Amino acid sequence: MLVPYHEEMTREALAPHFSAGALDIIIAANLKQDSLRGQIGHDEYHYDNNAIEKGDRYIIEQRGYVLATLLSPGILGAWIAFGRLLHTAQDFYAHTNYVTMWLDEFNGAPPPPPEIDPLRKDLIKSPGLHSGNIYLPMDALYFVRPLRPLALKLLPQNSHGRMNLDSPEQGPKFEYARAAALKRTQYEFDLLRKILAPEMFARFTDK
């Protein structure tokens, strides 16, 4: 998703739970994943190029960094790792066909976006799950607005340019991707609340 939506969702889900300072660090780490350095050679950050397993492993790895940091006197690394984790988890719904597969079950009459289930195991493990491939240079030209119509004419259906749900410009499916990503953000926080000892959780939330 585009940077404003990553920040918006993260604040909406987590503002009640973290100190302002901790939340700012989490959001900064989340948004940094979309820097040029985070875009090149890091498909696992965004679930691009069918890096489904790599993206899953990256989330688990960052969750492990959260735990490892909280077992030491430090805390900054836990917030940074959590922000990175959330970026990848949120991008899952914008860069894969998960939302499309979920909507296809309703024969054109789906429930409203807030009712989407972001963790359907049968969909997450479906052999039909895939993400958009990046075809250069056309997928780069997609981000140059005057050249976007040309890029879309030349890009295949399984390209990032055609598949992404990064903003409302991509149509009504965006609201489902956003709702799923918001729920996933809340889920990742609740998961850490369950597995962290109370004193570790208090340090993590900085409250």
Image: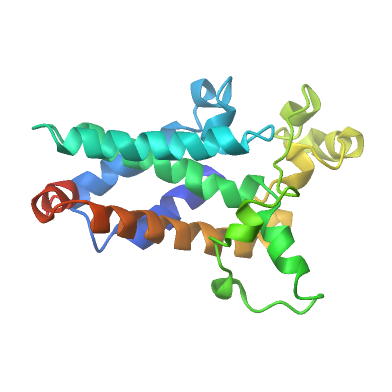
Q: What residue appears at the point 67 percent right and 47 percent down from the top-left corner?
A: 96
In this picture, is 164 found above or below 62?
A: below
Q: In the displayed structure, does residue 59 sit left or right of residue 17?
A: right
Residue 17 x/y as whole percent: 23, 60
Q: Position of residue 167 (x, y in %)?
A: 63, 52
Looking at this rendering, what residue extends furthest in the right direction? Answer: 153
- In the picture, which quadrant includes the C terminus? bottom left
**Colouring rule applied to residues:** rainbow
**Relative depth, front residue between 67 and 116:** 67
Q: Is residue 83 left or right of residue 74?
A: right
Q: Is residue 173 visible?
A: yes
Q: x%, y% of residue 112?
A: 62, 77
Instruction: Give the x, y percent position of residue 58.
Output: 46, 34
Q: Is residue 30 visible?
A: no
x 90%, y 33%: residue? 154
- Can you say whether 167 is above or below 74 in the image? below
Kindly identify the residue that appears in the image at 75 percent across and 30 percent down.
139
Describe residue 206's horizontal placement relative to residue 116 as left or right. left
Q: How many marks?
A: 0
> Who is closer to the viewer here, 156 or 25?
156
Q: On the rendered structure, is 94 left or right of 58?
A: right
What residue is at 81 percent from the left and 33 percent from the top?
147
Quadrant of the image occupied by residue 131: top right
Between residue 34 and residue 88, name the one nearer to us: 88
